[in-house]
Image: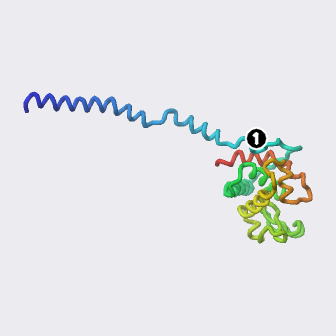
């Protein structure tokens, strides 16, 4: 091989090597996200519902709280999932969970015999005889939540009402102010589980 051709081949190879050395590590670092864990943590934190959306009027009166077992927590999560399916905001989930806490302590109750309030069933103690659905439907957490929230959507200005007023308008309870005591716990449940 003549000297000129040999120098050209070696020169090109050297350029390729030098370019690879400089471009390789730069390209490799450019593909890696910088501080990839910090933005994720900030994004997750920012995705938590704003407390002013959950409790826009502040809680009313003394608040009650119960420890939830796995079944009750699963029912609360089912209410949240149904609320999202209905395209409703976090506030609707707070009202729904507070209502269920008052009506059934988030337990999907079947017929309670002599202790039953008429034919009330499920998470919201809805009555088949009042047109809420069949016993099978009412004891399905998704169905009963969607039925409650359908009633809620029919209440003009429910988003701006105190929780107990919105819940009472749908439920027509003998104890209309009782829903208010569960607002903080319901808001805490929604804040913790809305994005999980």
Tell me: residue 42, above or below residue 191. Answer: above
Q: Which residue is mark 1?
A: 52
Residue plotted at (83% across, 49% down)? 163
Disc 1 is placed on an element classified as: helix
Q: Residues within 10 Å of mark 1 (few under 14, many from 20)?
A: few
Residue plotted at (68% across, 48% down)? 194
Tell me: residue 23, above or below residue 131. Answer: above
**Residue 122 location, quadrant:** bottom right
Residue plotted at (74% across, 44% down)? 53
**Residue 84 location, quadrant:** bottom right
**Which residue is at the front of the view, 74 or 172?**
172
Does residue 95 appear to the left or right of 21 in the view shown? right
Q: Position of residue 102 (x, y in %)?
A: 84, 55
The residue at the far front in this view is: 156
Tell me: residue 195, above or below residue 168. Answer: above
Residue plotted at (74% across, 60% down)? 145
Q: Position of residue 78 (x, y in %)?
A: 70, 57
The residue at the far right in this view is: 174
- The figure's colour scheme reads rainbow
Q: Position of residue 151 (x, y in %)?
A: 79, 60
Q: Position of residue 134 (x, y in %)?
A: 77, 71
Does residue 47 appear to the left or right of 11 in the view shown? right
Q: Quadrant of the N terminus?
A: top left
């Amino acid at each position: 091989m003549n000297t000129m051709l040999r120098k050209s081949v070696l020169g090109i190879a050297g350029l390729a090597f030098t370019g690879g050395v400089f471009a390789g590590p730069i390209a490799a670092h450019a593909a890696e996200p910088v501080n990839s864990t910090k933005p994720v943590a900030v994004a997750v934190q920012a995705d938590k519902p704003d407390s002013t959306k959950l409790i826009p009027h502040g809680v009313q009166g003394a608040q009650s709280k119960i420890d939830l077992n796995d079944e009750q927590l699963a029912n609360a999560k089912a209410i949240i999932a149904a609320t999202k399916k209905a395209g409703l905001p976090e506030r609707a989930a707070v009202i729904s969970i507070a209502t269920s806490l008052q009506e059934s302590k988030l337990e999907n109750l079947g017929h309670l015999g002599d202790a039953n309030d008429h034919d009330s069933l499920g998470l919201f103690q809805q009555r088949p005889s009042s047109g809420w659905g069949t016993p099978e439907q009412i004891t399905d957490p998704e169905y009963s939540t969607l039925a409650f929230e359908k009633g809620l959507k029919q209440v003009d200005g429910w988003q701006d009402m105190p929780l107990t007023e919105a819940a009472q308008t749908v439920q027509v309870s003998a104890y209309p102010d009782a829903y208010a005591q569960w607002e903080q716990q319901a808001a805490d449940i929604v804040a913790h589980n809305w994005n999980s």
